[in-house]
Image: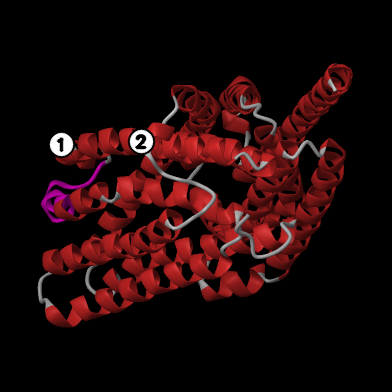
């Protein structure tokens, strides 16, 4: 097997964390450079980036399903099924990304107007939007390639590709400021460099995988059964993520009805808390891969220790980072020159965040563990909790709540879901153990 060493939670988490950091950097470079040119351009690109984020969620159907299956077959050391999973995953990604990219390009003007962009900025935004839409299939295939590279722990290749792509993107963006004198030309150049930053990893990852002895990306390995399983595993997650994004828009609408200051407090706290979630999601994804490999290798006895350890690590890290964020909130408030009324809301919300983030970490870990067990139907628990409990409470008590009360409500929501996820996890664990016990006698009788 192509592996740089023993697969551990830390080794996988370190790879994923580096990816996340570079992804954040790449997303920030365009905004940083355009901030020197035009505030309108910054607002336009920020809006387009939100649309692109939603698009990646749609393509993520194939990415998640491929990740679950590949990790399992990697642990099983089944090279043929690994090849089938990778090839089928690429087919699903290409289909979904091509359809989505085409829709975004054809209806680019209508979409931008629907999102509330002013008529004067639409013509400025369309070329940038179209170029980024063309890159969606490349980003999707890159994510499928990363499924393989994470499992075989090709950390140096991942870092090198992301570093080259990010550096070229930054240098190209800076150069565009000196080479062009119009905002539209600068935005066009920045869009091209963003695509280049995705093409570099695409070429490097693709070249390495074509030389791999583990997988062979050939048409004959495309499997209808794999395609079906990939979609069935990934579709519920996409539905849950879309549900969460719509809920956030609804929540912003509700909070805004209480006053612009409360919405500003919500925006600041969510932005500052984002770095905690990067760590949380990193450990969750690493747990999923590690667990999938162990299940594929039929090492059921290692499942509980892996999940228990990852939950402890994730909760502890989230708690410490939450405390750290709260301890520096006064400095952040001074830096952003936030007025006293908003500062009081932020202080209360960040104090509640100390309790909120560990519960969120538990949920992320349990969700990732259930995915590793090929259980994706549980995600509807989140949809039920948000729209069946949280939303009705917000409607009923809308005139009596503040944004601080919403944060307390979110703690209750995360706690409620963690209990349901834990029950589901125990059920799946017992089911796995029963399957293993019932298989043993038949195996022994055959031998």
Left or right: 340 as drawn, with respect to 427: left
The relative height of residue 312 versus residue 321 in the rendered view (above or below) is above
Question: For mark 1, what is the residue?
Answer: 106
Q: Residues within 10 Å of mark 1 (few under 14, many from 20)?
A: few
Between discs 2 and 1, the one toward the N terminus: 1
Q: Secondary structure at mark 2?
A: helix
Q: Secondary structure at mark 1?
A: helix
Question: For mark 2, what is the residue?
Answer: 219
Q: Is residue 148 visible?
A: yes
- Name the one closer to the observer, 437 or 363: 437
Query: What's the magenta bit mostly, secondary-structure-wise?
Result: helix
Residue appearing at x 20%, y 53% in the figure: 131
- Give residue 67's quadrant in the image: top right
The relative height of residue 432 versus residue 315 in the rendered view (above or below) is above
Specify start and end residues of the magenta stretch as a single range: 116-126
- Name the one closer to the observer, 59 or 359: 59
Q: Picture coordinates of residue 242 (x, y %)?
A: 47, 32
């Amino acid at each position: 097997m192509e592996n740089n060493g023993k697969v551990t939670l830390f080794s996988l988490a370190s790879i994923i964390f580096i990816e996340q950091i570079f992804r954040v950097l790449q997303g920030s470079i365009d905004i940083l450079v355009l901030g020197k040119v035009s505030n309108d351009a910054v607002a336009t690109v920020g809006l387009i980036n939100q649309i692109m984020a939603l698009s990646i969620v749609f393509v993520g159907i194939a990415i998640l399903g491929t990740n679950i299956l590949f990790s399992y077959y990697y642990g099983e050391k089944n090279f043929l099924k690994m090849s089938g999973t990778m090839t089928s995953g690429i087919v699903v990604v290409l289909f979904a990304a091509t359809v989505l990219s085409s829709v975004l390009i054809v209806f680019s003007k209508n979409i931008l107007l629907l999102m509330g962009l002013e008529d004067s900025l639409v013509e400025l935004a369309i070329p940038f939007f179209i170029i980024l839409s063309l890159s969606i299939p490349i980003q999707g295939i890159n994510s499928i390639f990363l499924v393989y590279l994470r499992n075989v722990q090709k950390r140096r290749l991942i870092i090198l590709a992301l570093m080259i792509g990010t550096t070229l993107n930054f240098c190209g963006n800076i150069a565009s400021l000196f080479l062009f004198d119009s905002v539209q030309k600068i935005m066009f150049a920045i869009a091209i460099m963003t695509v280049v930053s995705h093409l570099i990893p695409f070429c490097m990852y693709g070249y390495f995988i074509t030389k791999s002895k583990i997988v062979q990306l050939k048409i004959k390995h495309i499997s209808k059964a794999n395609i079906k399983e990939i979609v069935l595993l990934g579709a519920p997650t996409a539905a849950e993520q879309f549900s969460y994004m719509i809920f956030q828009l609804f929540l912003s609408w509700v909070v805004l009805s209480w006053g612009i200051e409360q919405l500003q407090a919500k925006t600041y706290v969510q932005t500052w808390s984002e770095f905690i979630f990067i760590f949380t999601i990193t450990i969750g994804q690493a747990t999923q891969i590690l667990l999938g490999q162990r299940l594929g290798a039929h090492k059921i006895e290692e499942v509980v220790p892996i999940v228990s350890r990852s939950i402890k690590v994730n909760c502890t890290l989230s708690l410490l980072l939450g405390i750290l964020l709260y301890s520096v909130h006064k400095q952040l408030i001074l830096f952003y020159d936030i007025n006293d009324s908003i500062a009081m809301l932020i202080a209360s919300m960040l104090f509640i965040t100390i309790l909120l983030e560990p519960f969120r970490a538990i949920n992320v870990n349990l969700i990732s563990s259930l995915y590793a067990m090929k259980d994706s139907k549980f995600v509807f628990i989140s949809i039920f909790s948000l729209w069946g409990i949280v939303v009705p409470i917000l409607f009923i008590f809308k005139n009596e709540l503040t944004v601080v009360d919403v944060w307390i409500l979110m703690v209750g929501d995360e706690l409620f879901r963690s209990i349901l996820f834990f029950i589901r996890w125990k059920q799946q664990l017992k089911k796995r153990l029963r399957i293993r016990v019932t298989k043993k006698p038949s195996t022994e009788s055959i031998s």
